[in-house]
Amino acid sequence: MTENKARRILVTGGSGLVGRAIQKIVADGEGREDEEWIFLSSKDADLTDAADTRALFEKHRPTHVIHLAAMVGGLFRNMKYNLDFLRNNLHINDNVLHTSYELGVQKVVSCLSTCIFPDKTTYPIDETMIHLGPPHSSNFGYSYAKRMIDVQNRAYREQHGCTFTAVIPTNVFGPYDNFNIEDGHVLPGLIHKVYQAKQNGNALSIWGTGKPRRQFIYSLDLARLFLWVLRQYDEVDPIILSVGEEDEVSIKEAAESVVAAMDFKGDVLFDSTKSDGQFKKTASNGKLRRYRPDFTFTPFSQAVQETCDWFVANYAEARK
């Protein structure tokens, strides 16, 4: 007979980049004796469907939920399907939060994104600025759906006393990412491009000038912070999970890290006829540092090396 664990933690979107990272660190010894972890993917239930969501929760009876599931896509898919991104994510989030409330889940930690912040803003952005203006028009559907999680968390706290909160990571990367060149994010796309250039003996062509700056967080670091939020962070207000402003890197520096990690010897060209996108979206990790001044992030070059090694070793199965 299995022992009754005090905490049953259900992770939606458990097969994605962040879900896999949480799974790894829990398996590597950062889980606790009194915790049972359940990682679910879209194959287990259609979270846009209320009845399906409820059946899933009744089956597993979680005491805690980490909510990572979302309809996601790159820039061009977002621009084309803003309505679909809005509706599907609103349904998913409403079903997960309301079912959690109805079945007495003690705590829900949802995952937001820095794209929810106003397009026109001052930097660094912080947690107080989420609702101070419209998000960028390119992915307003996804952004507003994610913002509504924050609104719902406050409403569930106010009306029902629920401990529902959210985290806002900056650019996440790591093993199990989506390495699609057209539709993936910048770093995994670069890794795949360098891999191809090396295989084919071509020059590496990078879109844009390489000057835009980003804060990258390694998925395993983010996973450790998720566990801390689940166990110890009790504010309803969201918290930005990111490296500091001083650890921001340019796309050019990111590309150089990938080139070094992959031991690529060819020419590297920047195609300045292609758009750079947003120059920077610097986020403050001041709130995180007040709580966790001790937290040590994996050095960027080491995290890039580990991610490149994983991609090369798992090329056949990697999402691309």
Image (cartoon, grey):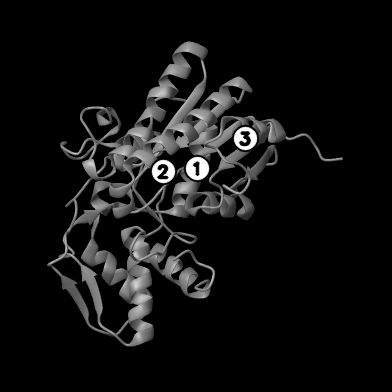
| Residue position for label 2 | 294
| Residue position for label 1 | 69
Q: CA distance from mark 3 to mark 1?
A: 14 Å
| Image quarter of the N terminus | top right
User: In x, y percent, where is residue 18?
Assistant: 48, 50
Foreground mark, 3 or 1, reads 3
Q: CA distance from mark 3 to mark 2?
A: 41 Å
For label 1, count other residues whose C-alpha is less than 10 Å away and answer few (under 14), some (14-19) or many (20+): many
Nearer the observer, 250 or 276: 276
- CB contact under 8 Å: marks 1 and 2: no
User: In x, y percent, where is residue 127?
Assistant: 30, 31
Nearer the observer, 170 or 227: 170
Which numbered disc covers residue 52? 3
**SS of the residue at dot 2?**
loop
User: In x, y percent, where is residue 66?
Assistant: 53, 38
- CB contact under 8 Å: marks 3 and 1: no
